[in-house]
Image: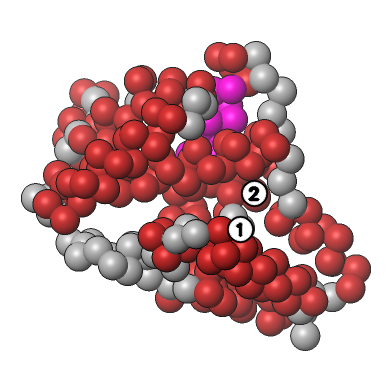
Amino acid sequence: MGGDFFALMFRMKYISRWGLMRQLRQENLSEHSLECAILSHSLAVIGNKVFGKKYDVSAIALKALYHDAPEIITGDMPTPVKYFDDSTKSAYKTVESHAIKRFISLLPEDFRTDYSTLFNYTADEKRIIKAADKLCAYIKCLEETALGNHEFNNALDSTKNIIRNLNCEELDYFMENYVSSFNKSLDELQNKDDNDIQKEIIK
């Protein structure tokens, strides 16, 4: 029975995101979860190194990998629907809670405590993962608009406003110092040393 949990987690790749939007490149839940984990880790490191926080960086990155796992059951519910009013938010939270309980029940009993912790967040962990999630959305909007997809113009502006209002110093630091790199081409991202190494390999 324990294998059912892991098999379900691997179904993240079948869950499409941005269902109401016309995308030039489709995004699935599996890649989003990885990217959110990478960014959550980076924000936690920024918090520790730049702002003197004491985040458990590894725990935050690991929990970020699972943060949207309930969508395996619910699908990627569009934000306007999920947050339409208090009743829809509450209903979604109930379904999400049941999904997590279902996941845990599929594990061997002596595994359950270890995996239950992945779905429980401290206030700081929740804040950092939420910030990373919004940063993922912003980067997705950047990518789509850079490809000429005007469908994401409004989403880009609204997501940037959400980020401003989160009052997350780690996220603000990332936006100021690192987000511009996501507009660069592969050649621009590779420095001269990288290109010289590639030339040597080709020789």
Identified by mark 1, the residue type is Tyr
Say whether residue 40 is magenta: yes
Judge from the rendering whether residue 60 lies leftward or rightward of residue 84; answer left or right.
right
Identified by mark 2, the residue type is Leu
Q: Give coordinates of residue 25: x percent, y percent.
A: 23, 62
Q: Do the residues labelled 2 and 1 touch (CB within 8 Å)?
A: yes
In the rendered image, the vertical position of residue 154 relative to residue 42, given as above or below: below
Q: Label 1: which residue?
A: 66
The answer to which quarter of the image holds residue 24 is bottom left
The answer to which quarter of the image holds residue 126 is top right
At 38% from the left and 60% from the top, the residue drawn is 80
Which image quarter holds the C terminus?
A: top left
| Relative depth, front residue between 53 and 191 | 53
User: Magenta stretch mostly in which secondary structure?
Assistant: helix
Judge from the rendering whether residue 74 lies leftward or rightward of residue 13; answer left or right.
right
Q: Label 2: which residue?
A: 62
C-alpha separation, residue under disc 2 versus residue under disc 1: 7 Å
Q: Give the range drawn in magenta.
A: 39-47
